[in-house]
Image (spheres, rainbow, N blue to C red):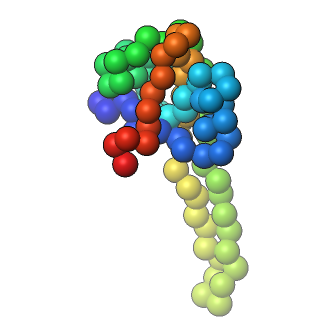
Amino acid sequence: MNILIKPIVTEKATANSELNNCFSFFVNTKANKVEIKKAVEAAYGVSVEKVRTINVRPDRKTKFTKTGIQHGKTNAMKKAIVQLAEGEIIDLYTNM
């Protein structure tokens, strides 16, 4: 099971990483906090203090077209906000 899907690189996530030393990732929906901690420590070689997770529900959309009503939804996601130990850092921009 691949736990870390990709890092979240937005304005809010970048500001949070600079101010609070917290980095955000999209993770597998079945992964728990212990698995996320081990995956981040193994992938980036840092020590993790705290992991917070957020389950993002799917957005449901309805379109009214000539052929009728069409329903659709986006995928459910799970985000993890990982706080690193003091002095640790992850450089997300070198591998791009």
Determine the residue positioned at 58% across, 58% down.
Answer: 73
Determine the residue positioned at 64% across, 53% down.
Answer: 59
Q: Which residue occupies the foreground of this view, 66 or 86?
A: 86
Q: Which residue occupies the foreground of this view, 41 or 67?
A: 41
Determine the residue positioned at 55% across, 29% down.
Answer: 23
Q: Is residue 62 above or below residue 1?
A: below
User: Does residue 51 appear in this view?
Assistant: no
Question: Quadrant location of residue 37?
Answer: top left
Give coordinates of residue 3: x percent, y percent: 37, 30
User: Does residue 59 appear in this view?
Assistant: yes
Question: Quadrant location of residue 54?
Answer: top right
Give coordinates of residue 43: x percent, y percent: 32, 25
**Tag count in the figure?**
0
Determine the residue positioned at 53% across, 41% down.
Answer: 8
Q: Dividing the image into 4 quarters, which one contains the N terminus?
A: top left
Question: Quadrant location of residue 79?
Answer: top right
Q: Which residue occupies the foreground of this view, 19 or 76?
A: 19
Give coordinates of residue 49: x percent, y percent: 53, 9
